[in-house]
Image (cartoon, grey):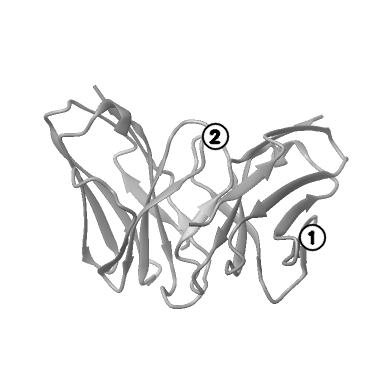
Amino acid sequence: DTEVTQTPKHLVMGMTNKKSLKCEQHMGHRAMYWYKQKAKKPPELMFVYSYEKLSINESVPSRFSPECPNSSLLNLHLHALQPEDSALYLCASSQDPTWGFEQYFGPGTRLTVT
Amino acid sequence: GENVEQHPSTLSVQEGDSAVIKCTYSDSASNYFPWYKQELGKGPQLIIDIRSNVGEKKDQRIAVTLNKTAKHFSLHITETQPEDSAVYFCAASIDNAGNMLTFGGGTRLMVKP
């Protein structure tokens, strides 16, 4: 099973809402990632979790709050977002954060902020 | 930080022809270079990667070449098929584990039957 699943597939939220994105993998991977991808643009790295600990935060605004409850699950909590935050949010995982392994991407959550 | 430029932004080829996509990177410390294919409505999927100690790597119809001196790497797809149509991204990573990927701008490849 080389699958990364993400829920929901689509999300529409107002600027005052609080919502969460969920990512799950059952490959035993110990590195997990959040990326943001705007239309017709490449993915941009937001966060990296290594062994369930946040290891890289690419200067992401605090209205995005990641959480890694266990080695299989990664959440992204959203609060007070802006319309420019509308994008495809991709989750990825890789086998080991200390060695160069392939990153497996999920299908993404398409977020629209109204 | 690392900057990756990718050309062309769109590429149209006839089925059976070859396609070449080129990328340049700015940081000479980059040591891992993956290529991803992204189909509509899907996340990127790794198709091939190369590390800085290797000059060329091939996997069936796909090959990647790396020129460290010139800081550029290329993707070659031979005998293209309609199912190769997608957006292709190159990327470079400065850390040994490939965690911090910087992507190129992407190339939309269209293979006409």
Neighbours of disc 2 within 10 Å: few (<14), some (14-19), many (20+): few
| Rendered view: A2 above or below B55 | above
Labels 1, 2: one chain = yes
What amino acid is labelled 2 in the image? Answer: Leu
Residue B60 shows which numbered tag? 1
In the picture, the quarter occupied by the C terminus of chain B is top right
What amino acid is labelled 1 in the image? Answer: Gln
Q: Which sits in the foreground, B53 or A109?
A: B53
* Subunit that carries the residue with mark 1: B
Q: Residue at x 24, y 53 (%)?
A: A75
Mark pair 1, 2: CA separation? 24 Å
| Rendered view: B41 above or below B34 | above
Neighbours of disc 1 within 10 Å: few (<14), some (14-19), many (20+): few
Disc 2: which residue: B40
Element type at marker 2?
Answer: loop
Q: How many marks?
A: 2
Element type at marker 1?
Answer: loop
